[in-house]
Amino acid sequence: MVSADDRLPETPATEIPVPLRVGSDHRHGGRWTTLRGGGREWLWRRPDTGRDGVRAGDPFVDAGGLEECLPTVRGRTDHGDVWSRPWRTTGPGAATIECPDFTLTRRLTDRSGVVVADYRLQADPGYRFIWAAHALLDVSPTARLEAPAGTPTRLYPEAAALLPAGPWPAGRPWLSGTWPTPAGLPLDQLGPDDGTAVGAVLLGCPTVRVNDGADRLTLHLDCDGQPRSTALWRNLRGWPTDGPYRSIGVEPLLGGTFDLAEAGPDDAAEVPPSGEVTWRLTISAHRSSGGRPR
């Protein structure tokens, strides 16, 4: 699963690094609660959700921030098994979550202003999973998602009513196209709110950049021997139907689809004979010289 070119343009010399700081809530699902730098908070948060009272197996409660979704994003259990369980703190920035089929360990650090998240999953050899860093970002209506042009992209059925080419083909879990206009639908613009909600997966795309005014946020995923992608959830007050709100998800992904149950042979990560998979997520920020946070 590779794109035509997985490289983004170099950061212009006129942009300066912005040190980031990260915080998380181990007690309530390991959720990242802040990703802040240069006077700006990048993570969107949804207040008063009742998230603190959830238990394993409860329906997903969207509190914003960045959720660890494992072993699936959509499907059963919705958003996976780790968001609703307490994590055990094991050291500075480090925590572990033990589930019936796997153990996940994460260490978060701010290295010279760059946020680095190191993961280790332990499970039986052959165990298949999808993982997503389900980051909901607080970005303006003029923000854009930058990814290599021509990246193979899967578009999901919630986009059916928006397709310029006609109705959704019966029985298809997704449509295939290329970034930034899979199936003729422009996806790189992250607003303004128009009452729609669209999900997509950029296959073989481990690096993306969010451009918002003077600010840039770059997300990069490293993992040897496993499929790397980026998922997009562009909810412009189109979901849920009984109380829609705006939420923009830019989600580094191990795998190639949202739902593990739909994953083909190359669409999920798989634990090797060693019984362990490790990966690293790196997030950095830059700002144009003279620019101010929005």
Image: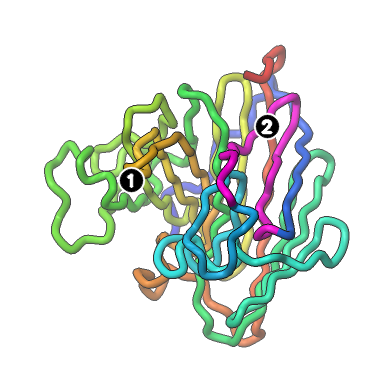
SS for dot 1: strand
Label 2 neighbourhood size at 10 Å, few (<14), some (14-19), many (20+)? some
- The percent position of residue 276, horizontal first and vertical second, equals 66, 78
SS for dot 2: strand
Of 27 and 95, nearer the camera is 27
Q: Quadrant of the C terminus?
A: top right
What residue do we see at 73% from left, 63% from top?
106
Q: Quadrant of the N terminus?
A: bottom left
Point out the frontmost of discs 1 and 2: 2
Q: Is residue 186 left or right of residue 112?
A: left
Residue topped by disc 1: 178
What residue do we see at 58% from left, 79% from top?
271
When asked about the image quadrant of residue 91, the answer is bottom right
Task: Tell me the amino acid under the disc marked 1.
Answer: Thr
Question: In the image, which residues are magenta?
Answer: 28-50
- The percent position of residue 104, horizontal first and vertical second, equals 68, 71
When asked about the image quadrant of residue 245, the answer is top left
Label 1 neighbourhood size at 10 Å, few (<14), some (14-19), many (20+)? many
As for residue 169 lying within the magenta part, the answer is no
What residue do we see at 62% from left, 82% from top?
123
Q: Earlier in the sequence, mark 1 or mark 2?
A: 2
What residue do we see at 24% from left, 38% from top?
184
Residue topped by disc 2: 41
Task: Tell me the amino acid under the disc marked 2.
Answer: Glu
What sort of colour scheme is used for the picture? rainbow
